[in-house]
Amino acid sequence: MVRLVQIFLLLLAPLALLACVFVINRTFAQASGGREYVVRMKLPEIGEPADLPAVEGPRDARQPLVVIDAGHGGFDPGAGHGRVKEKQIALQIARAIRADLLARGDIRVALTRDGDRFISLADRPDIARRLGADLFLSIHADSAESDLARGASAYVLSEKGSGEAARRFAASDAESDATSARRVNGVVLDAANDAVGAILLDLSQRGAQEASAQVASFLIEELSDADVRLHRRHVETAALAVLKAPDMPSVLFETGYINNAKDAAFLQSRAGQGVVAGAAARAIRRYFARRADFQ
């Protein structure tokens, strides 16, 4: 008899638990008027641009457009030294360059981020490409094991990185929907004309690399003229992800070493940021002044 009672209680326990859950659910449903809450999120349609930043400056779309990318952001602080974080310095300098460029009203500017948020490496140049940017400038602050390392640098895409970018671009096009148009510098590439597309891509990429090197050279010259300490007095190359847009001039600007006390103090100061931003803005203006399509 005792064993039967034990079996009965074991069977009764789950039923009692279900009854309690039912009563609690009914109680809360009545308290909220019987409403159920649904979280809805609007996702972009296929092919629809998402989270594109605002373009500031003249409304004339014929004016050159520069997309300035403040490196890191959000949960990715970048390099750091005490309270100094790369993401903060990069954003402050990006804003200063924007202000300098907009002051004359002849160049349009967009920032990939204008706040402390994370953007993936691949999305940064992609934002610039979707906006139709004429130049992409990514701002960073370096760090090294030695506290003695200091000075600004300018990087463009290396030959190895260029080949990787071309292969990735071709692969992404091959995997894209057949109904979507492939474009390089605004030219639609017909999927049936792959040979012509490859030639156009190669020419576009060479032109973008030459333009990138020119902008970077101007940047080094302007920094030197402004007495900004340089880590190297020549343009450096690297296969960095943010430089791998095949048809857009792209430069990565390392503004200094924030683990070096002197560089950190300079880059944190409003005066230092103004000097660096002024040099970058002058380099950008020199580049566009020499382009025939913006005369």
Image (spheres, rainbow, N blue to C red):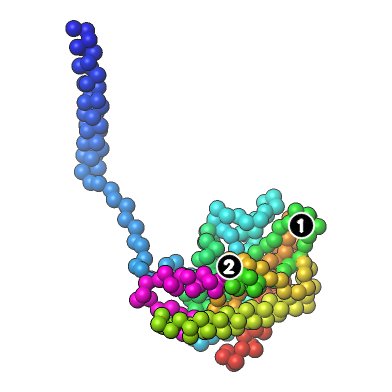
Q: Amino acid at mark 1?
A: Asn
Looking at this view, is 243 or 162 the one in front? 162
Q: Amino acid at mark 2?
A: Val
Q: Quadrant of residue 146?
A: bottom right
Looking at this view, is 213 or 159 the one in front? 159
The N terminus - image quarter: top left
122 to 225, vertically: above or below: above
Residue range highlighted in magenta: 164-187
Q: Position of residue 138 (x, y in %)?
A: 61, 69
Image point (81%, 57%), residue name: 148
Residue 165 lies within the magenta run: yes
Residue 232 horizontal side relative to residue 34, left or right: right
Q: Determine which residue is flagged by label 1.
A: 260
Looking at this view, is 26 or 152 the one in front? 152
67 to 267, vertically: above or below: below
Residue 119 horizontal side relative to residue 153, left or right: left
Q: Position of residue 225 (x, y in %)?
A: 78, 77
Residue 66 lies within the magenta run: no
Image point (29%, 50%), residue name: 38
- Looking at the image, the residue that sits furthest to the top is 1
Quick one: SS at disc 1?
loop
Find residue 242 and name its label. Answer: 2
